[in-house]
Image: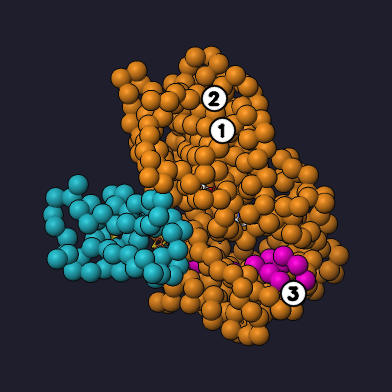
């Protein structure tokens, strides 16, 4: 669990995501989960490091303000 | 809580072969194979090419229903479209992985492995006796299985290893972001695979055409996002296809990740073995991982069965698996990874020049070894690459 609240966190656009699983091993705190039906980014675990963003082959991940 | 001897997570080539080999080595063991997808082998996230010799260790491709095409030539395409044809006999095969993966899983089933599709592992923890309890979900139901050995064959996600405390994270520079279409109605040599390099085409990777039938091919690319000019992998591929095959019909589409890295430092811990993509066992130069996954699955399945029979599934006992893999291919991958790093420093002009030089070698003499040797004479810049390869 992170200690400092990041300004931005990652979100996934489920209309674009193909559930390929590529982003999971890139995420240092294991905040991305692929379950039976869809991909989920855990808002409370994401540190906002952006490591998952560019490698997504279809651009399904982006950063949003951590409201 | 149901008890099993071996629980295999993921029914790709690594998991199916691991389950089969565990059951074959010790038929009295209960072996359970879990697959999250609703069908083994689908969706296909692969260009489906395999080398002939490696495939034949596991299955006979002649006349097999899971083969799409026999390949007898490799055509390297330089960034400026100069083609270099390499004559090799029995290069390999293009599989139909929907059928191939199902064939492997059916083989395991026939041997007595229990296979559950549409079923995923969602976490695991140690119980008081040091056995693994694996949480399993399927549709609306949830269950916990206790296993003596868990084989993590969960592919690129590589989460099962992380649950077990192993480091299977991937640095972004070693992740190839891949996209592929099935393209129909295009013109190419149906007996050849094509590989094209280039910073504008697929930075840090390559684009490919792998024939499935005359006029029909898997057309895709893998690239390293850190080297991108801002486009994502799909945009690179759309641009490449628009240039090369503007009239092709795109009848299928897939996305995936290839880990172009070296084997994780530790592929085992108490009661756990990691095999295939999940342990970064892909050839880091070619990006091929199907045969490697089967080879690792075979080692993992046999090691698990032997360890259970001996009543010792400790990390110390399971370390034999890691050693066997490193001797088989893991050490080679360390060398291939160094070549990959050296190639990354060469630019498009270098590859264009090399292609023209190599085309002066008579075609029937153009083996990969000769290309390399020739390149060293004509292109002294390559010597550091060669030197790093042989150290
Ligand atoms: C676009 C692309 C092209 C490629 N082209 C080639 C090629 O031409 N030749 C080649 O040799 N290799 C190729 N590869 C690599 C090849 O696909 C892999 O190396 C190979 O599939 C690895 O096999 P595996 O069994 O380790 O993993 P996978 O085949 O990925 O199987 C893992 C399985 O585990 C399942 N799973 C994951 N998590 C769970 C869970 N928690 N519970 C239950 N099930 C789970 C997944 O659904 C999946 O079915 C390519 C890869 C990509 C992405
Ligand atoms: S990399 Fe992109 S397409 Fe693949 S699972 Fe992650 S968000 Fe989805
Ligand atoms: S931004 Fe970093 S922490 Fe957040 S999901 Fe992406 S990789 Fe994980």
Chain in cyan?
A
- Tag 2's secondary structure? loop
Q: Residue at x 48, y 71 (%)?
A: B233
| Residue designated by label 3 | B215
The residue marked by circle 1 belongs to what chain? B
Look at the image and give the colour of chain B: orange
Q: Is residue B72 visible?
A: yes
Q: Are marks 1 and 3 on the same chain?
A: yes
Q: In this view, does B82 lie above or below A10?
A: below
Q: Earlier in the sequence, mark 1 or mark 3?
A: 1
- Tag 3's secondary structure? loop
Q: Can residue A25 be seen in this view?
A: no
Asked if the magenta segment contains residue B223, the reply would be yes
Q: Is residue A12 above or below residue B249?
A: above
Crowd band around label 3 with a 10 angstrom C-alpha radius: few (<14), some (14–19), many (20+): some
Name the disc covering residue B30, or none. Answer: 2
- For this rendering, which residue is in front, B58 or B138? B138
The residue marked by circle 3 belongs to what chain? B
Q: Residue at x 28, y 64 (%)?
A: A11
Q: Do labels 3 and 2 share a chain?
A: yes
The residue marked by circle 2 belongs to what chain? B
Instruction: Name the mark nearer the viewer: 3 or 2.
Output: 2
Inter-mark Cα distance, 3 to 2: 46 Å
Q: Is residue B200 left or right of residue A7?
A: right
Q: Position of residue A30 (x, y in %)?
A: 31, 49
Inter-mark Cα distance, 1 to 2: 8 Å
- Overall secondary structure of the magenta section: strand
- For this rendering, which residue is in front, B292 or B374? B292
Range shown magenta: B210-227
Name the disc covering residue B114, or none. Answer: 1
């Amino acid at each position: 669990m992170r200690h400092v609240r990041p300004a931005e966190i990652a979100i996934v656009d489920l209309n674009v995501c193909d559930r390929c699983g590529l982003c999971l091993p890139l995420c240092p705190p294991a905040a991305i989960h692929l379950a039976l039906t869809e991909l989920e980014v855990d808002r409370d675990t994401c540190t906002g490091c952006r490591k998952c963003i560019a490698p997504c082959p279809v651009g399904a991940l982006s950063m949003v303000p951590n409201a | 809580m149901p008890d099993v001897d071996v629980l295999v997570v993921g029914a790709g080539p690594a998991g199916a072969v691991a389950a089969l080999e565990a059951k074959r080595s010790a038929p009295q063991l209960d072996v359970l194979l879990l697959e999250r997808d609703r069908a083994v082998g689908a969706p296909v996230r692969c260009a489906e090419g395999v080398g002939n010799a490696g495939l034949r260790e596991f299955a006979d491709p002649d006349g097999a229903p899971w083969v799409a095409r026999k390949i007898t030539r490799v055509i390297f395409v330089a960034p400026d479209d100069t083609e270099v044809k390499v004559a090799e006999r029995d290069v390999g095969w293009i599989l139909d992985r929907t059928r191939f993966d199902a064939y492997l899983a059916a083989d395991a089933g026939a041997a007595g492995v229990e296979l559950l599709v549409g079923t995923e592992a969602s976490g695991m923890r140690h119980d008081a006796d040091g056995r693994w309890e694996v949480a399993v979900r399927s549709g609306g139901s949830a269950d916990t299985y206790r296993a003596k050995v868990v084989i993590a064959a969960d592919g690129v996600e590589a989460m099962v290893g992380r649950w077990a405390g192993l480091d299977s994270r991937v640095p972004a520079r070693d992740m190839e972001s891949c996209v592929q279409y099935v393209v129909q109605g295009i013109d190419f040599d149906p007996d050849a695979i094509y590989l094209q390099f280039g910073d504008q085409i697929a930075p840090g990777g390559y684009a490919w055409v792998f024939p499935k039938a005359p006029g029909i091919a898997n057309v895709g690319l893998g690239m390293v996002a850190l080297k991108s000019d801002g486009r994502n992998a799909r945009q690179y591929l759309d641009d490449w296809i628009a240039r090369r095959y503007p009239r092709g019909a795109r009848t299928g589409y897939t996305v995936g990740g290839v880990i172009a890295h070296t084997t994780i430092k530790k592929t085992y811990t108490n009661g756990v073995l990691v095999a295939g993509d999940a342990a970064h066992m892909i050839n880091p130069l070619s990006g091929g991982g199907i045969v490697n996954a089967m080879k690792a699955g075979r080692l993992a399945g046999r090691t698990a069965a032997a360890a259970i029979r001996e009543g010792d599934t400790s990390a110390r006992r399971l370390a034999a698996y890691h050693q066997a893999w490193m001797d088989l291919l893991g050490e080679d991958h360390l060398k291939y990874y160094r070549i990959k790093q050296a190639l990354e420093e060469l630019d498009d002009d270098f590859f264009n020049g090399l292609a023209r030089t190599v085309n002066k070698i008579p075609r029937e003499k153009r083996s990969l070894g000769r290309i390399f040797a020739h390149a060293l004479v004509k292109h002294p810049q390559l010597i550091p690459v060669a030197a790093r390869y042989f150290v």
